[in-house]
Amino acid sequence: MSSATPIRLLLVEDDDAYALIVTARLGRVQPPMVVRRVTRLDDAVAALQSDPVDAILLDLGLPDSFGMETVEKTTAAAGEIPIIVLTAHDDDADALRAVHRGAQDYLLKDEADGELLTRAIRYAIERAGFQRTLKEREARFRALVENSSDAITLLDEHFVAVYNSQAVERVCGYSPEELQGQPMHAHTHPDDLPELRRRFAECLANPGRPVHFEYRFRRKDGSLRWGEAVGVNRLDDPAVAAIVANHHDITERREAEAELTRRERYFRALTERASDLVVVLSTGGLVLYESPAIQRILGYAYGELTGRSVLDIVHPDDRERAAGLLATWSEEVDSATPFEFRVRHKSGEWRVLEALGRSLYDDPSSGIVVNARDITDRLGTEEALRRTEEQLRQAHKMEAVGRLAGGVAHDFNNVLTAIFGYVDLLLDRIDEADPRRADVVEIRRSAGRAAALTRQLLAFSRKQVMQPRVLDLNEVATSIQKLLQRMLGDDVQLVFQLEPHPWRVRADPGQLEQVLMNLAANSHDAMPEGGRFALETANTTLRAEDIAGRPGLTPGEYVLLAVADSGQGMPESVRVHVFEPFFTTKEQGKGTGLGLAMAYGIIKQTGGGIYVDSEEGKGTRVQMYLPRVP
């Protein structure tokens, strides 16, 4: 009550003189006490119904009531309004009876001066207010307890139940009465008792601070459940005077958490042991997570890229396309578009990854999960396979062309034989001085040139009669060194790089010399301003992986005969046709297109293989493998 608010009193007193004394005494105090006087109990009851007051001063001797009956009737009418009994009789028994019947205080009229009476009134009003507050709090607490879904065990300092809410039966299976007087740990799993006792001690030592703990308990039906309790020490709170413990069943939650943990462990194991790289990105492309496969695939340590933009390691030429695809993945929940792009390995090399991305969960804004695998080696294998297939197709084509060329050359050779025969007959019949003889001689020369072309076609088709013998390729090369230099010209440097102890091969030396001369002629044409021509021999053992892309060879021992020039080189579109008969890039009249075709046939006829590597502006290298003679 505010110090400025007047205190309203009801004085129930039939003695006029004493009533004046009391009214005068109380009128002088601060804040002032406003006294309303009645002389009869019935009037007091009527006054309480019409005009509420803060306290009642009650005389026990009234015209219509006397003694303890007066107290009882006034208490019934006053409710929670405090009553102070004023009497002229000094009787401790009456004082005790009055208090038991609802009076707040018992004062003798002769001793109740202004100060004593004022203190008694104020004390009674404060005490009544405290009791009202306590009752309200108790009512609210009881309502909360009874309506709570949690089981609530008010405990004493020994953690013995002094009160149980109705919810304990739903949670534990026991009625509140069955648990009354039992310690909280009576139904706790033995393995959880040490932790429970430790928490009890913590609760006792920290009044007012909530203490949480989880433990297993056994219900009345014998089933084992998980419970969570929150205990608060309110022993010092007079309104409670107990340890308040809220208890609820968390078995389903614990089982759900265990299942979630199991699933997280399962999916983490799948992610971390997967051969593919798994990366989680923000919608802006920042790396939120990368699986341990990052180290095997790209060389970065686990977690090293976290927080960085994934575009930092994407090849500049692929970056714009990658950024666009990230935007697509982040906007479309069900997008599953595969994507190939180059990524920088920690070593600095570029690797090709194939990635598949989609937005995370059902919310595109939550991020993107990307599965990626390194396909660099696969692409290399596919390219090698493509080249091998192309070479096989070329080899098959060359075989077909060779058979055709051989058949044509054979038939053409038969025609030339007849021409030579008739020309020789004519020459025998025509005199040296006959002007017609010159025409016949020219016919024979033309037939000879045709026969030379026929021999080249037969060499290509491997039907030319050879005279093979065991020989040293170094000797073949050095025997025509001067001829090669003369063919190449003085502005071309001729370099020999010969195997010191070459293995022997079986071949026709004359035809090998022709092959080298033809190759030198081609190099001379490819170096109009001079350059370098290198001839190399080397012993080599080819394994299965070495002959990949070298159709026609089998694993084994070979002698390599190679020539390389620093000339103009040739594009791939030209290189694939160089062994075809009559294929040439020279002007009309400057080449027959049979030089490399003949070389192809001669080397194939030895059981070996011939291959050309060339690139525009970077020269040409021709490699010929001849089988070693055992």
Image (spheres, rainbow, N blue to C red):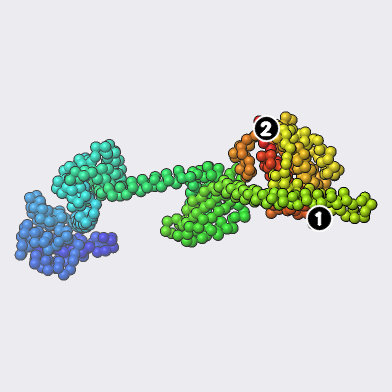
Counting from the top left corner in percent of width and height, residue 89 is at: 8, 54
Relative placement, left or right, of 508 versus 87 is right
> Which residue, as the protein is rendered here, is positioned at the far bottom?
50
Counting from the top left corner in percent of width and height, residue 142 is at: 20, 55
Q: Give above or below for 628 relative to 611.
A: above
Upstream in sequence: badge 2 or badge 1: 1
Residue that badge 2 annotates: 629
Q: Quadrant of the C terminus?
A: top right
Distance from disc 2 to disc 1, alpha carbons, whole Å, reads 41 Å
Relative placement, left or right, of 304 versus 473 is left
Dot 2 alpha-carbon crowd within 10 angstroms: few under 14, some 14 to 19, many 20 or more: few
> Which residue, as the protein is rendered here, is positioned at the far front?
429
Secondary structure under badge 2? loop
Observer-nearest of 74 and 527: 527
Rendered residue at 69%/47% (across/down): 461
Residue that badge 1 annotates: 589
Q: Give above or below for 629 relative to 34.
A: above
Rendered residue at 17%/60% (across/down): 81
Amino acid tagged 1: Gly
Rendered residue at 84%/53% (across/down): 443
* Whether residue 362 is visible: yes
